Amino acid sequence: AQSVTQLDSHVSVSEGTPVLLRCNYSSSYSPSLFWYVQHPNKGLQLLLKYTSAATLVKGINGFEAEFKKSETSFHLTKPSAHMSDAAEYFCVVSGATNKLIFGTGTLLAVQP
Amino acid sequence: DTAVSQTPKYLVTQMGNDKSIKCEQNLGHDTMYWYKQDSKKFLKIMFSYNNKELIINETVPNRFSPKSPDKAHLNLHINSLELGDSAVYFCASTQWRDRGSHTQYFGPGTRLTVL
């Protein structure tokens, strides 16, 4: 069965400092992995996705993630946080029967 | 020109009532989904329709009945509402040929509160 584990429920950074949101996955086959963002009282927006092409994936708003099979990880990073990055971030894996399986989310707070 | 829209945005109702949530997408997609997000922000798929045919039906009480009148619409009807049904319900859509990459487009959500 496929699953994802987001290692931090809350991450707080200062504006202008790097962001690291950690995600480990479990999959019995080569997975498709995604990061979605949810701003307060908003819907979900796709940040980036990995589908067995390049292992370093670039997304919107300066975010990127690296697929590391040896570590079963798909961590999300950004070199410099902006106040507008404050949101809930979900790591997602595609499961059997083509459904998305969400992690429990990481709430990113950005301090001025 | 909203891609995936849901109505209503907020729904407050009493236990035991029956209510419906509507979803429409104008992306030309043929596959639509309903997800439930609980109070701890955990998101889980409930149903999926492809070309008006049910393809995913998770372990959801049969008080929940999805209906897809056409490819652009997927409605969710809930009978005999219970307190535990309080959640945010998200609709999403994708094109079946893209399902391997699963770029699903989500609606803004419907916050259901059962009193």
Image (cartoon, coloured by chain):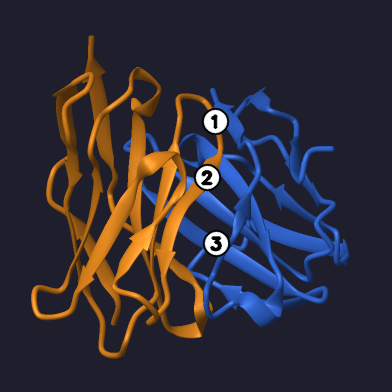
Chain colours: A orange, B blue
- Circles 2 and 1 in contact, beta carbons < 8 Å: yes
Residue type, label 3: Met
Neighbour class for label 3 at 10 Å: few (<14), some, many (≥20)?
many
Q: Nearer the viewer, residue B52 or A83?
A: A83
Per the image, label 1 sits on a secondary structure element best described as: loop
Label ID, residue B46: 3
Residue type, label 1: Lys
x, y percent for residue B109: 61, 37
Q: CA distance from mark 2 to mark 1?
A: 9 Å
Q: Of discs 3 and 1, which sits in the foreground?
A: 1
- x 34%, y 42%: residue: A89
Residue type, label 2: Gln
- x 35%, y 35%: residue: A88
The residue marked by circle 1 belongs to what chain?
A
Mark 2 and mark 3 on one chain: no
Q: Which residue is disc 2 drawn over?
A: A45
x, y percent for residue B66: 73, 60
The N terminus of chain B is located in which quarter?
Answer: top right
Q: Identify the image quadrant of residue A11.
A: top left
Query: Farthest residue toward the right?
Result: B70
Per the image, label 2 sits on a secondary structure element best described as: strand
The residue marked by circle 3 belongs to what chain?
B
Neighbour class for label 1 at 10 Å: few (<14), some, many (≥20)?
few
Mark 3 and mark 1 on one chain: no
The residue marked by circle 2 belongs to what chain?
A
Q: In this rendering, is residue B105 above or below B99?
A: above
x, y percent for residue A17: 16, 27
Q: CA distance from mark 2 to mark 3?
A: 19 Å
Q: Which residue is disc 1 drawn over?
A: A42
The C terminus of chain B is located in which quarter?
Answer: top right
- x 19%, y 59%: residue: A5
